[in-house]
Image (cartoon, rainbow, N blue to C red):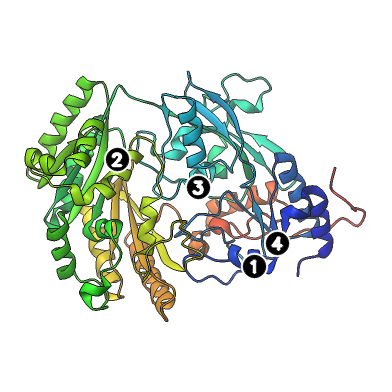
């Protein structure tokens, strides 16, 4: 039971309008795209670092656990729901200032409430020659929140955690840490150099519960002289390993600088349309025979990939030659697109099909947003796939939590070798189909040497029994993949207990937790870092406003 005195203290700091306790708001905050049991007793909405600091001091004083969220749109992994029951949500979305920007050095410093869409518009209105790296989630998703989960995107800056620095972190003790050179007053290199002096701390605050990140600097990509995307398809279900093994050397050599995304036929179909209820007579799951028919009708492959080429026109021409050579005999179709050709394809689709022997008119709805993501243009189009099994079309303002879309993501990471990609695809496809779900898979060559397989379990929560079947499917798949060495690169809140570390590693983490959060109030249980027994309030402490 939340102490009313704590609420009164927070109201003095934030104002009554920013301490939310209405049943409707708390019910919405405790919703995800899969079943959760956690209750949320209140929502706090600070607007400044100082307000964050004071909120945490009050929480520590009254032994109230708090759970920070940036935008709460971590769909498929738990949205904005805390890991454990009874946490007050610390909603940082009002902290939406862009604090610093350099066109010359290509960086921007932001607060956690700044979204992909907000930063994109900021750059656009300044006619900037810098690009953001967007994810396929939503323009309304937080940049900081995604990066702290080690999310990834589509450009050469796609591994987000590798392209940030200069964290400002508020601890539950009320202290503030600045990482890198920023810990030294007046350090000029703080936004451009990660390491500083001595041990680097940035990584401690990703996928952890050690502090609240209230500032982060992002490095932005200078727009190249020329950009060209390429799209390919392989019609053979068994063609994935050869594709991965052909593309990896180009990634390692630097010919391909960005993430390479390969999606299976189920993934592509869900991006084009919703479940074919009419055609199938309502039967589920969509069988391989059915999806094979849609491949032929809609002109996509068993495996479908995309990536970008960035550089001078000469560099792109050479990279294009190497891509053609690498995919010869492995891809059944390979198409290169730039701005001009994409415009012509939309305007004269029939002529385009005649010239290129590839009719993409039906796929333009899917191609355009992916093409845009490779140029740093955020989009919400991929979010439509969360409505795959819903009976009604996605609304204009999509909200998978509110609309009871069922979505569970499992994202194992593996060496970037074809045999591992094949194993991940075969294991996940078999289990999902057996449980009655379509295996929607994407394989991303995220670095030179690693790939991530994002497995989507997509369903309709309004259908009786689907939640239980989806969770059973998820757990079976997670346990089997882990047993074979395929561990996830990030976790949903329902799986974070599995990350609890033992031995020296676990003792190290718990020791840090006791040091930086002695009251144990910050996001207990997040990524397996345990709950420290809270300290009792000091008898003489009446107010922590100061």
Of badges 4 and 2, nearer the viewer stands: 2
Q: Distance between the residues labelled 3 and 1?
A: 22 Å
| Earlier-in-chain disc, 3 versus 1 | 1
Q: Nearer the viewer, residue 143 or 351?
A: 351
Location of residue 377 (image quadrant): top left
Image height of 411 relative to 280, above or below: above
| Earlier-in-chain disc, 2 versus 3 | 3
Q: Which residue position is annotated with label 3? A: 140
- Residue 192 image position (x, y, % from top left): 52, 24
Disc marking residue 42: 4
Residue shown at 41% from the left, 64% from the top: 407
Q: Distance between the residues labelled 1 and 2?
A: 39 Å
Q: How far apart are marks 4 and 3 (CA)?
A: 23 Å
Residue shown at 55% from the left, 38% from the top: 202
Of badges 4 and 1, nearer the viewer stands: 1
Q: Which residue position is annotated with label 2? A: 371
Q: Which residue position is annotated with label 1? A: 24
Q: What element carries label 4?
A: loop
Q: What element carries label 3?
A: loop
Residue shown at 60% from the left, 25% from the top: 181
Q: Distance between the residues labelled 4 and 2?
A: 41 Å
- Residue 95 image position (x, y, % from top left): 64, 42
Q: Quadrant of the C terminus?
A: top right
Mark 4 residue crowding within 10 angstroms, few (<14) / some (14–19) / many (20+):
many
């Amino acid at each position: 039971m939340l102490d009313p005195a704590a609420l009164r203290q927070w109201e003095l700091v934030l104002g009554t309008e920013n301490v939310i306790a209405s049943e409707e708001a708390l019910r919405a905050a405790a919703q995800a795209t899969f079943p959760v049991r956690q209750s949320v007793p209140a929502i706090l909405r600070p607007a400044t670092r100082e307000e964050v600091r004071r909120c945490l001091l009050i929480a520590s004083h009254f032994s109230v656990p708090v759970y920070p969220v940036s935008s709460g749109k971590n769909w498929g992994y738990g949205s904005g729901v805390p890991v454990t029951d009874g946490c007050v949500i610390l909603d940082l979305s009002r902290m939406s200032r862009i604090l610093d920007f350099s066109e010359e050095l290509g960086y921007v410093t932001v607060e956690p409430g700044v979204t992909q869409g907000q930063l994109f518009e900021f750059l656009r209105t300044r006619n900037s020659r810098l690009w953001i790296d967007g994810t396929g989630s939503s323009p309304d998703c937080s940049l900081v929140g995604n990066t702290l989960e080690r999310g990834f995107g589509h450009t050469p800056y796609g591994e987000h955690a590798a392209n940030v620095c200069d964290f400002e972190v508020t601890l539950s003790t009320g202290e503030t840490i600045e990482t890198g050179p920023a810990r030294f007053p007046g350090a000029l290199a703080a936004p451009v150099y990660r390491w500083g002096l001595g041990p680097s701390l940035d990584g401690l605050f990703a996928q952890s519960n050690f502090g609240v990140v209230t500032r982060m600097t992002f490095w932005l990509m200078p727009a190249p002289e020329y950009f060209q995307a390429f799209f390919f398809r392989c019609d053979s279900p068994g063609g994935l390993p050869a594709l991965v093994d052909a593309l990896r050397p180009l990634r390692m050599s630097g010919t391909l600088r960005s993430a390479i995304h390969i999606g299976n036929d189920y993934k592509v179909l869900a991006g084009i349309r919703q479940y074919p209820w009419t055609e199938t007579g309502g039967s589920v799951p969509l069988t391989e025979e059915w999806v094979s028919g849609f491949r032929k009708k809609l002109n996509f492959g068993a495996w479908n990939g995309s990536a970008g080429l960035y550089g001078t026109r000469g560099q792109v021409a050479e990279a294009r030659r190497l891509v053609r050579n690498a995919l010869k005999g492995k891809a059944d179709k390979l198409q290169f697109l730039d701005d001009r050709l994409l415009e012509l394809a939309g305007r004269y689709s029939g002529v385009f099909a005649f010239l290129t022997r590839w009719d993409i008119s039906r796929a333009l709805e899917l191609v355009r947003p992916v093409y845009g993501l490779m140029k740093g243009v955020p989009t919400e189009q991929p979010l439509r796939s969360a409505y795959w099994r819903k009976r009604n079309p996605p609304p204009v303002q999509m909200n998978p939590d509110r609309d009871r879309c069922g979505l569970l993501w499992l994202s194992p990471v593996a060496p970037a070798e074809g045999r591992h990609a094949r194993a991940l695809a075969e294991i996940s496809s078999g289990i999902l189909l057996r449980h009655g779900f379509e295996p929607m898979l994407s394989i991303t060559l995220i670095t030179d040497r690693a790939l991530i397989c994002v497995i989507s379990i997509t369903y309709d929560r309004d259908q009786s029994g689907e939640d239980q079947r989806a969770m059973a499917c998820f757990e079976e798949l997670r346990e089997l993949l882990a047993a074979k060495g395929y561990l996830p690169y990030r976790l949903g809140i329902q799986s974070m207990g599995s990350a609890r570390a033992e031995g020296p590693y676990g003792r190290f983490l718990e020791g840090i937790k006791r040091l930086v959060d002695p009251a144990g109030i910050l996001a207990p249980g997040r990524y397996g870092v345990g709950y420290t027994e809270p300290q009792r309030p000091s008898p003489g402490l009446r107010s922590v406003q100061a």
